[in-house]
Amino acid sequence: MRRDVFQAIADPTRREILNMIAYQSLNLNAVAENFTVSRPAISKHMKILTECGLIVITQQGRERYCKARMEKLNEVSEWVEQYRQFWTKKLDDLGTFLEGETKRTKSGSRKKSGRRNK
């Protein structure tokens, strides 16, 4: 099954695993000790993270260490960026429209008040 980064970060446990190993490599036991779920469940999460390339597991003696490959999150960042740009433009356009409406309303109220004084 083809796994992608979006699928990996969809799960809060996997996101927490990434947070844990983002700054330092940890062995699999150290990762598993931080969760109340079973070790087989953690192994399944690790498999998914490995398949999508977010972590690399290396053997050092008898221990297996997990290292994060955060650059793989660039795919998510690029996807989100296109929508950030889209919504920023839409909100800027809305702001411009509302400013124009406010000015139009204010100038219209001045004209009305000027008629009353005459």
Image (cartoon, grey):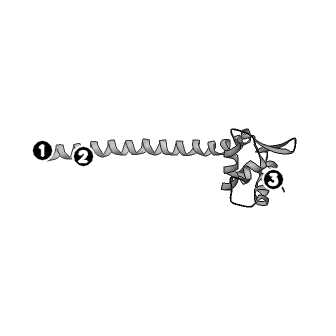
* Callouts 3 and 2 close, C-beta under 8 Å: no
Residue 83's label in the rendered image is none
Seen at 52% across and 45% down, the residue is: 90
Give the residue number, with chain letter if any, for mark 1.
117
Residue 35: image location, x then y, percent: 68, 56
Secondary element under disc 2, as helix, strand or loop, is: helix
Taking 97 as reference, is 75 left or right? right
Secondary element under disc 1, as helix, strand or loop, is: helix
Give the residue number, with chain letter if any, for mark 3.
47
Q: Nearer the viewer, residue 36 or 19?
A: 36
- Mark 3, residues whose alpha carbon is within 10 Å: few (<14), some, or many (≥20)? some
Q: Earlier in the sequence, mark 1 or mark 3?
A: 3
Residue 66: quarter of image: top right
Q: Earlier in the sequence, mark 3 or mark 2?
A: 3
Give the residue number, with chain letter if any, for mark 2.
109
Residue 11: image location, x then y, percent: 68, 56
* Callouts 2 and 1 close, C-beta under 8 Å: no
- Which amino acid type is marked by label 3? Lys
Seen at 28% across and 43% down, the residue is: 106
Residue 7: image location, x then y, percent: 73, 54
- Mark 1, residues whose alpha carbon is within 10 Å: few (<14), some, or many (≥20)? few
Query: As displayed, is residue 71 above or below residue 15?
Result: above
Decide if residue 4 is in sight here.
no
- Which amino acid type is marked by label 1? Asn
Secondary element under disc 3, as helix, strand or loop, is: helix
Query: Looking at the image, is mark 3 or mark 2 nearer the viewer?
Result: 3
